[in-house]
Amino acid sequence: MSVTNVHLIYFSPTHTSRYVGEAIVRGIGLEEVKVSDLTYTSVDFSEIATDTLTVVVLPVYAGHLPQLAVLRMASLHATGAPAVAVVVYGNRAYEKSLAELDVFLSGKGFGVIAAGTFVGEHSYSTVSYPIASGRPNKNDLEEATDFGRRIRQKVENVAIAVSSLVVDVSRIRRPSQPLLPLLRFIYEVARLRKNGNPMPATPCVDESLCNHCGRCVMTCPNGAIMKGDECHTIPDRCIRCCACVKGCPQKARSFETPFAVLLSKYFKRQKHNRVIL
């Protein structure tokens, strides 16, 4: 197997997946790099050649891959090309997301030769209720770059088929999680749901602060905010990524959910990134 170039594919409304993916690619160190950003549009992929190493980095929403990202990768396909599967989660749990990405890539004709789970600032994180605030930080990105170097070493000058290098993503080390905070979180979530505290459908807007700059329109990955009508969000199109909240220069948008309070309270202990090669 000879790898001559890298194809980085990511979906990253709040940039955490992009930062991790770019760091991995820097570590791989090949000069020829193609980037496909799925954040705002689908990509019409040609078949990925066997000398291309494809690195796919997606965020985790409620323990799963965002379906919008999966739909935008629908045309991705290969015949025995190597791939790296990476998910970025907000310090709670990535649950089934890595397995889902592995199944997706394998079904599209790739051999997943490495995988990783990295921590990024949670979409619901705020100054008042921080959840993995500032991650990926410098150390996280250094770990991602080192992961890339190790991937390069694995595929470099290896005269065997990709199928012989495939990893079992289920064997990746799970991040440690103290039991008591987890049980308290589960109890509090159940209590909220029993009491009828639903997840807000969309972010709130303080109309006195909004100056209709249009930044939220540009940052929304699914066209849920219309130019000229920035104080409203279309519920059926909002994926609650909070890109509009984090990107608003006027701080006019907020996503008020009691789940942010619980996530900040019970998941203070920072989890470690994990990889498998």
Image (cartoon, rainbow, N blue to C red):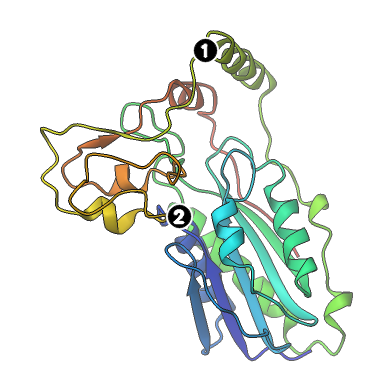
Dot 1 amino acid type: Gly
Left or right of 200 on screen, residue 5: right
Residue 154 image position (x, y, % from top left): 74, 77
- Which residue corresponds to mark 2? 16
Q: Give me the C-alpha separation between circle 2 and circle 1.
A: 32 Å
> What quarter of the picture does the C terminus occupy?
bottom right
Between disc 2 and disc 1, the foreground one is: 1
Residue 196 numbered tag: 1
Structural crowding at the residue carrying mark 1, measured as other residues with C-alpha within 10 Å and reported as few (<14), some (14–19) or many (≥20): few
- Circle number at residue 275: none
Quadrant of res 178: top right
- Decide which of tag 2 and tag 1 comes sooner along the chain: 2
Callout 2–callout 1 Cβ contact below 8 Å? no
Residue found at x 45% / y 55% = 16
Q: Position of residue 85 (x, y in %)?
A: 67, 63
Left or right for 119, reference 154 = left
Which quarter of the figure has residue 106?
bottom right
Say above or below: 277 vs 92: below
**Secondary-structure class at tag 1:** loop
**Residue 84 image position (x, y, % from top left):** 68, 68
On the rendered image, what quadrant is the N terminus found in? bottom right
Q: Residue at x 14, y 53 (%)?
A: 213
Instruction: Establish if 265 lies above or below 220.
Output: above
Identify which amino acid the numbered label 2 is placed on. Answer: Thr
Residue 134 position, x and y percent, is 39, 45
Secondary element under disc 2, as helix, strand or loop, is: helix
Q: Is residue 172 left or right of residue 245?
A: right
Label 2 Cα neighbours within 10 Å, binned few <14 / some 14-19 / many ≥20: many
The residue depicted at 46 percent of the width and 39 percent of the height is 132
